[in-house]
Image: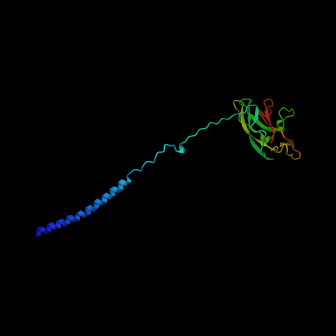
Amino acid sequence: MTDTRHVTRTTRTIRRTRRPALALAVLVSGVVTVVAACATPPAPPPTTGTVPPTTTLTTTTTTTTVPTGPAVLAENPVAGVPLGGTKAVTFFWNGQVPNQLIYVDICRTTTSDPTFQPGEDCAPLSSLNPTATPTGSGSTTVSIFRGPEPSTDLPWGCFRATDVAPPGVQRNTTCYVRVTSNTLFNNTAAREVAFTLA
């Protein structure tokens, strides 16, 4: 009788210890499954064979044509200048003395006029000194004005054909952009382009 009870107890013990073992096996199996799912790398995106727009390189070639002639205004006649206002226009020159300081001015009369005097006939506020070049050619932006010359120190201005000048102001319907080198008073090297206001 004693042996039988002992065997029975042993059997029960074995059964009790087997149940937690099965549960642990199930739990371990579940963990392994979760880990395996997390470790799976994502599928690569489909390849379309096109290059993304951000990596596309576009190159362009810009050709700048410099006008020929001793003095050229990019726009002539000059349109759209308000009365009493200005408009920026590119001015080109060629044939000046290389490596000499350049003087560009807006004047009321031509340099060839025997009475021409830069201090009286050119607007002081329009005077520019672009950097000298080794070729004697270059360009700069001039402010073409319409109305009395901007400093109002001189009794003249540049006007449209239909404009009425204020009293005491000489009305010029043709003005000049003048360029010279070395000194403002160098009339020998001076070149100019006549312009009107449209």
Residue 139 pos. (x, y %): 72, 36
Relative to 119, residue 33 above or below: below
Quarter of the image for residue 172 reads top right
In the image, 126 versus 56, the foreground residue is: 56
Report the side of 98 relative to 113 (left or right): left
- Seen at 82% across and 36% down, the residue is 118
Residue 142 pos. (x, y %): 75, 40
- Seen at 80% across and 40% down, the residue is 124
- Seen at 37% across and 54% down, the residue is 37
Can you name the residue that lies furthest to the left here? 1
In the image, 45 versus 177, the foreground residue is: 45
Can you name the residue that lies furthest to the bottom here? 1
Relative to 166, residue 19 above or below: below
In the image, 143 versus 174, the foreground residue is: 174
Residue 145 pos. (x, y %): 79, 43
State the count of labels.
Answer: 0
Instruction: For residue 17, say whether it is visible.
Output: yes
Relative to 13, residue 144 above or below: above
Instruction: For residue 154, say whether it is visible.
Output: no
Relative to 179, residue 44 above or below: below
Quadrant for the N terminus, please: bottom left
Quarter of the image for residue 162 reads top right
Quadrant for the C terminus, please: top right
Report the side of 19 relative to 107 (left or right): left
Quarter of the image for residue 130 reads top right
